[in-house]
Image (cartoon, helix red, strand yellow):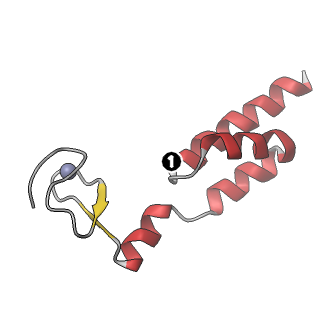
Amino acid sequence: MLLIIELGFAVATAMVASDRGRGKLAWFTLGLFLGPLALVIAYLTEPLEWKALENGTHKKCSFCAELVKFEARVCRHCGREF
Ligand SMILES: [Zn+2]
């Protein structure tokens, strides 16, 4: 019974982390060990996307809103030219 609860936390943590551009497997493992605490930590981490925009290494595609490299001339997600 306890194992099912732990697995639930691990899956939820992995989903939140991948939403923020982080590795699913690492956070899944963290969720297994830390349970609810890992989920809270995953929620508190700021998305990698913000950092990339802040540093100016990436920009947001104005067509599909995905993150692309700042120097990119063609969006790698939707294929449109800037
Ligand atoms: Zn795009």
Above or below 77: residue 56: below
Above or below 16: residue 42: below
Q: Position of residue 40 (x, y in %)?
A: 72, 55
Residue holding disc 1: 19
Q: Position of residue 61 (x, y in %)?
A: 21, 58
Q: Position of residue 51 (x, y in %)?
A: 46, 71
Quarter-of-image position of residue 44: bottom right
Q: Residues within 10 Å of mark 1 (few under 14, many from 20)?
A: some
Determine whether, in the image, residue 35 is placed left or right of residue 41: right
Q: Amino acid at mark 1?
A: Asp
Label 1 CB sits under 8 Å from any ligand 1 atom: no
Q: Residue furthest bottom?
A: 55
- Residue at coordinates 87% horizontally, 26% vertically from top-left? 3
Above or below 58: residue 62: above
Above or below 18: residue 11: above
Quarter-of-image position of residue 7: top right
- Residue at coordinates 82% horizontally, 33% vertically from top-left? 6
Q: Secondary structure at mark 1?
A: helix
The N terminus: image quadrant: top right
Determine whether, in the image, residue 54 is placed left or right of residue 29: left
- Residue at coordinates 50% horizontally, 52% vertically from top-left? 21
- Residue at coordinates 91% horizontally, 27% vertically from top-left? 2
The C terminus: image quadrant: bottom left
